[in-house]
Amino acid sequence: MKRMTLCVLILGLVFAAPVSSEERDDEERDRPKDFGVHGWGLRFGVGDDPDQIIGGVQFDHGEFKWVHLEPNIELLIGDDHTTLSGFYAVHFRFRHVHGFRPYIGTGLGLAIDYFDHPVLGDDTDVDIGFRLIGGTNWAIKNGRELFLEVSLGLGYVNDVQLMGGWSF
């Protein structure tokens, strides 16, 4: 699983780098937005322990100077688990660095996990927990953004997730 995670990370960086657009100035990006839904995006990735493939959607709930609000819904499948997760993330975005905008954050989530083990039988579990998040966004044409992030779960679904995606 660790080799696959590293390969996905490297491929994401290699293929995403050529589509980066010219950098907009910080004042334009740091303009506060009111709370509400300002856009949405697709997210995909892998999780470790349990090993799962992840797909989902995220929503832009506004950015207030350096703080960005981004809830998401994900479906995680693999390792005899099927999980539906809702998560509300808060990112602290740093200034642009060569077209990239790094961030750190945390969030609270709720997950419903269905475990189907051939020997132990079926079980459904509800998890509530936190994630510590680190990643970067970068602008592409038409005002869209790509992102790549890694997160560590604290009592929540996967121990580690590597995610990528884009916002519309």
Image (tube, grey):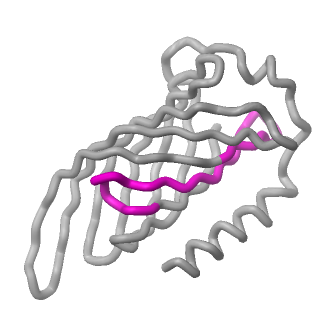
Please check the rendered image and state whether residue 158 is part of the magenta-colored stretch, yes or no.
yes
Q: How many marks?
A: 0
Which x, y percent locates residue 73?
Answer: 39, 45
In the rendered image, residue 37, in percent from the top left (x then y), is placed at 51, 23
Q: Where is residue 101 shown, x and y percent of the image? A: 73, 39
Residue at image x 22%, y 53%? 112
Q: Is residue 116 above or below residue 39?
A: below
Extreme residue toward the right, this view: 22
Magenta span: helix, strand or loop, mainly? strand
Instruction: Establish if 41 lies above or below 50.
Output: above
> Where on the picture, by quarter, is residue 60?
top right
**Residue stretch rendered in magenta on the structure:** 136-160
Where does residue 43 sit, x and y in percent of width and height?
54, 52
Q: Residue at x 61, y 15 (%)?
A: 33
Position of 143 with respect to 32 (left or right) is right
Q: Is residue 168 above or below residue 123?
A: above
Q: Quadrant of residue 10?
A: bottom right
Measuring 34% from the left and 43% from the top, which residue is drawn there?
86
Residue at the limit of the structure toward the bottom, as seen here: 119
